[in-house]
Image: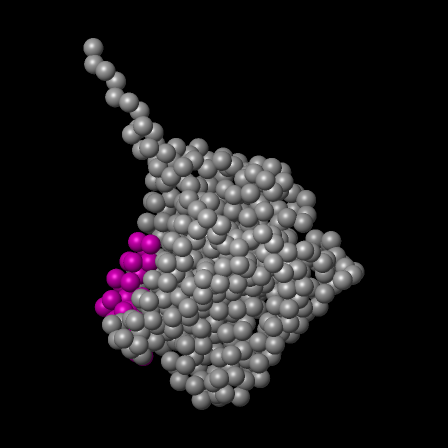
Amino acid sequence: MRPGPLAGRYPAAAAMVVLLLVPYLGLSSALPSVGPLISQQLHLDSQTITLARGLANAGYAVGTVLAVQFAQHLPQRRMLLGYAVLLVAGSVIAASATGPKMFIAGHVLQGLCTSLLLIAAVPPLFLDYPAEKLRWTAVILNLCVFGAVAAGPLVGGVQASFHAWRPLFWTVAGIAVVGLLMSLLTFQDTPPADRSAPRDPAAIGLAAVGSVAAFWGASQLLTHRFLDPVAFGPLAGGLALIVALWIYQYRARNPLLTVRSLASTIPVAGIVVAVCASAASTSAIALTSAVLPHRYPPLQQGLLYLPEIGGAVITAIVFGAVFRTRLIHYFVLAGMVFLAVGILVIRNAIPPTTVITLIGSALIGVGIGASVTPALFLAAFSLPSRSIQRVFAILELLRAVAAFMIAPILLHFATTVTSFPTAAMSTTLWICFGLSAAGATAGVLLYALGRVRPPAPSLDRWMDGREPAWQSPPLLAAIRHARAEPPQAEG
């Protein structure tokens, strides 16, 4: 196939990535604001809306693994075009839905295709351009993932203030169409990544069944008790399957996902921080936003989270400045500190006042932007760049599970069925604080026990595809070294 007229041009490729990733990521955090309008017009109850969100998040989790499998054996850019077409189709179906089944199908397709596009479109933006472009790619990725999520509550609040939800969904569909057009204009036919890679239906099956079951169970907590079999059974079973996937891939001789290769100090620390930060931030925002509708109209609710957008933008810019230096390690730690402080600020007033919410959302926005994506790069730089698709797949699967599954569980214990806070609200926010503090502490301890002196990444070496950007010491290297030293003889 002939290349598109904008093939090889970095600004056009970057614009394509933004247009394809932003729609669903922003919509996922805007949906709570417009959910009541969708329920009223499509005759859905709150449980069905929550189920639609849960299944869409499950599709996002599954798509990360599915995309890696497809990329190894099928022409990558042709697959990207197919994913973009499906994203447009899903967006149109959701926007034009006339009933529950149509809406759920469209929204789930949006979630699935977004993760497929993330794995297909983002790695080429890293690897197909000179090393000096990596800084901009890191900033763009940070803004795509967390800038869009931070903007969701404001966009949803604005749309809800007009008492309509379809314009938002049609706008999302329009953005997806432009993204499809850009994927055609920037098209460069590329071969499969690695035809010798395994075809692993077992890994895909574990990821698919585990994610769908776990997110289904978590969504049922809106109207069921935690130990109710319809909620607890799928939730526990799904998590067990995801753990089984992790163990299976770690033990496999030729795995689809690079689990074993990530088992050293720096990538493990990055994964722990990213998972803890995602779980803590998403849960804290969900807990506070659940009680705001009883105090503020939709537009004001969205404006209360405007500082979160500013925090995400600022940290993305700072991330670009420290990206090539050893400060990236300290930047991640600072993000976890900001996140923990932001959660404490919100916890001190339940329900939060206007000032408390503004301050807390700003701190949380800084914390998210400075911790999650930079921590993922700590893991990615610890392996050769040719493994980046597989690394991103396992990291996004874990991040999605942490971000979108723990929040419904904590929300279940913190509020009544009418979303009024109970005495457990303060406790659950303490749990969010504990997650952020534990992530920061674990990262510091892993570095100390691994005898890591934070290095600057060697991006030119990493771009070559055969070596990591730095050498990551084995886990607990200090303890292992101490045990290996023979005892000294006395006298």
Residue 181 location (% of width, % of height) = 71, 68
* Residue that lies at the very extreme toward the left in this rendered image: 491
* Residue 78 sits in quarter: bottom right
Q: In which quadrant will I find the C terminus?
A: top left
| Residue 220 in sight from this viewpoint | yes
Instruction: Estimate the x, y position of residue 54 in percent, counting from the top left.
Output: 42, 72
Q: Quadrant of the N terminus?
A: bottom right
Q: How is the image coloured?
A: one colour
Q: Identify which residue is drawn at 36% across, 66% down.
A: 238
Which residues make up the magenta segment? 410-435
Verify whether residue 416 appears in magenta: yes
Q: Main secondary structure of the magenta part?
A: helix
In the visual, does 139 lie left or right of 436? right
Residue 226 x, y percent position in the rendering: 27, 72
Question: Is residue 460 rendered to the left or right of residue 147?
Answer: right
Q: Is residue 39 magenta?
A: no
Is residue 421 visible in this depiction of the protein? no
